[in-house]
Amino acid sequence: MDDALLALFQGAAGKEVTGQLRFPEESEAYFEIVGEEGAPRRYVLKPLAELYGPGDPSKTADPQDDYYMPLFLKIEETIRSCAGHDPRLTDAQVSLTLSNLSVNPESHATGDSQASGYYLTQALQAHLQLLLSVNDYSRSEVRQALRKVNKSVQRHTQRDGPRGYLRFIREALRA
């Protein structure tokens, strides 16, 4: 967790604070906070490796468990958002990205920076940085969640074709 970011939010108790996550290719992910004064402030997010909590080794990341629901939801919302921004994204690219991140969530995106998988990797890592800044999930729990979402991707792809999972989450997470 990131106590400094939590303090920023807690220090704004009673005041409206909004923000936007940014992850420019050339610099670190940051959260742009806009308070009542209106001037945005940039808060650079800590690297994933510094944000993991101790977790509970006796628990398994379960998407039906209320404790883990924010983690699974963040992963799937990020995938859905990336698919909305890039219609070229396929289930195979999502699966490969999740597979790589489930081995090493901190691994850098490789390949063409214009490629769908590259952007998805950056987006997932940035959103996980923000989520882990305010939640206490362990590295093991994050890896388990990424693997379980990947199994869902593979199941939907096998049943419904090369964009079956992306169609599924578009419908399931419809606002």
Image (cartoon, grey):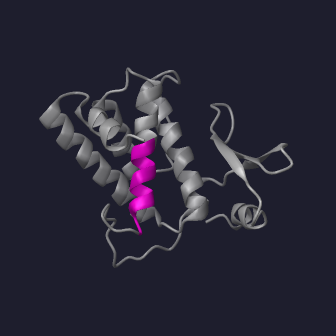
Identify the residue shown where x is 41% and y is 77%. Answer: 56
| Magenta-span inclusion, residue 69 | yes
Please give the range of residues in magenta.
67-77
Q: Measured along the vertical axis of the image, is residue 47 above or below residue 10? A: above
Identify the residue shown where x is 83% and y is 44%. Answer: 38
Magenta segment main secondary structure = helix
Q: Measured along the vertical axis of the image, is residue 148 above or below residue 89? A: below
Asked if one can make out residue 118 in the rendered structure from this viewpoint, the answer is: yes
Query: Splitting the image into 4 quarters, where does residue 164 fall?
Result: top left
Q: Quadrant of the N terminus?
A: bottom right
Task: Please identify the residue farthest to the left as the structure is shown.
Answer: 159
Can you give x and y, in whole percent of width and height, for residue 111 in the image?
Answer: 47, 26
Asked if one can make out residue 29 in the rendered structure from this viewpoint, the answer is: no
Can you give x and y, in whole percent of width and height, for residue 34 in the image?
Answer: 77, 47
Q: Nearer the viewer, residue 166 or 18?
A: 18
Task: Report the number of numbered marks.
Answer: 0
Q: Measured along the vertical axis of the image, is residue 44 above or below residue 55? A: above
Query: Splitting the image into 4 quarters, where does residue 48 fall?
Result: bottom right
Can you give x and y, in whole percent of width and height, for residue 173 in the image?
Answer: 37, 43
Q: Is residue 84 left or right of residue 135?
A: left
Q: Nearer the viewer, residue 87 or 50?
A: 87
Q: Is residue 41 left or right of residue 60?
A: right
Can you give x and y, in whole percent of width and height, for residue 32 in the image?
Answer: 72, 44
Q: Quadrant of the C terminus?
A: top left
Identify the residue shown where x is 50% and y is 74%. Answer: 54
Identify the residue shown where x is 26% and y is 41%. Answer: 153
Q: Measured along the vertical axis of the image, is residue 175 above or below residue 85? A: below
